[in-house]
Amino acid sequence: MRLYARRISVTAGLAALTGAIVLNGPSAQAAPPAPVDAATARSYVNALTVRPEGTLDGYSRAQFPHWITQHGECNTREVVLQRDGQDVEQDDRCAAVEGTWYSPYDGATWHDASDIDIDHVVPLAEAWRSGADTWTKADRQKFANDLTRPQLIAVTDRVNQAKGDKDPAKWMPPRADYACTYVRMWVTVKHDYKLTVDSAEKNKLAAVLKGC
């Protein structure tokens, strides 16, 4: 009976860890489309239009419709969870019910999709202040659900919430060795969508890329 009770205790303890952070290294690597290389990113930074950030007048997340249906019952969030996770299982409505997700922003591994946010690398509000306020809603929907560029990535929810709508001059991923990749992703998206940068943002991008 003593051995049986010990097994019950161990099993319960393991179950309690489901969805908890794991700190002993990645078991799955997020895999958005690859950004341009560092040399190309440096050339893109030099070509970006520098302009003070606009206001948020008229902005709301509803101006960027998401998450849209991508196929069947699967919306953009579920597609990214499937893409960026490992051993992901989905129910008949495409919701991720099992899997492992490694957040490259902070190096945490998670086993519960509710602990994961899908980050817009260039935040929606940042895009609005950088030129998206003049786009059509259809263009903003494309931006908010873009699976063809390094614009969407599965990361720890608390880290994404700490980032908010900040640009790299105000926020960088806490995992320092992801800085080059993150900046290359940011520059790729800003370049492809012809979004502007402010002076502090451009200086930070250039400084990080110098070391890449």
Image (cartoon, rainbow, N blue to C red):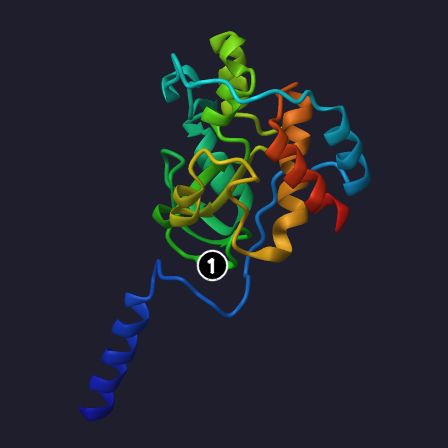
Residue 43: which quarter of the image?
Answer: top right
Depth order, front residue of 70/110: 110
Q: Position of residue 174 (x, y in %)?
A: 52, 54
Q: Residue at x 66, y 18 (%)?
A: 194
Q: Residue at x 77, y 42 (%)?
A: 38
Q: Residue at x 38, y 49 (%)?
A: 158
Q: Residue at x 51, y 70 (%)?
A: 24
Work out whether 102 lies above or below 16: above
Residue 95: which quarter of the image?
Answer: top left
Q: Position of residue 14 (x, y in %)?
A: 32, 71
Q: Quadrant of the N terminus?
A: bottom left
Whether residue 21 is visible, yes or no, is yes
Residue 151: which quarter of the image?
Answer: top right
Q: Is residue 150 left or right of residue 42?
A: left
Q: Position of residue 3 (x, y in %)?
A: 24, 90
- Which residue is labeled 1 in the image? 109
Work out whether 165 lies above or below 133: below
Q: Is residue 184 left or right of residue 12?
A: right
Local secondary structure at mark 1: strand
Q: Position of residue 153 (x, y in %)?
A: 53, 40
Depth order, front residue of 121/53: 53
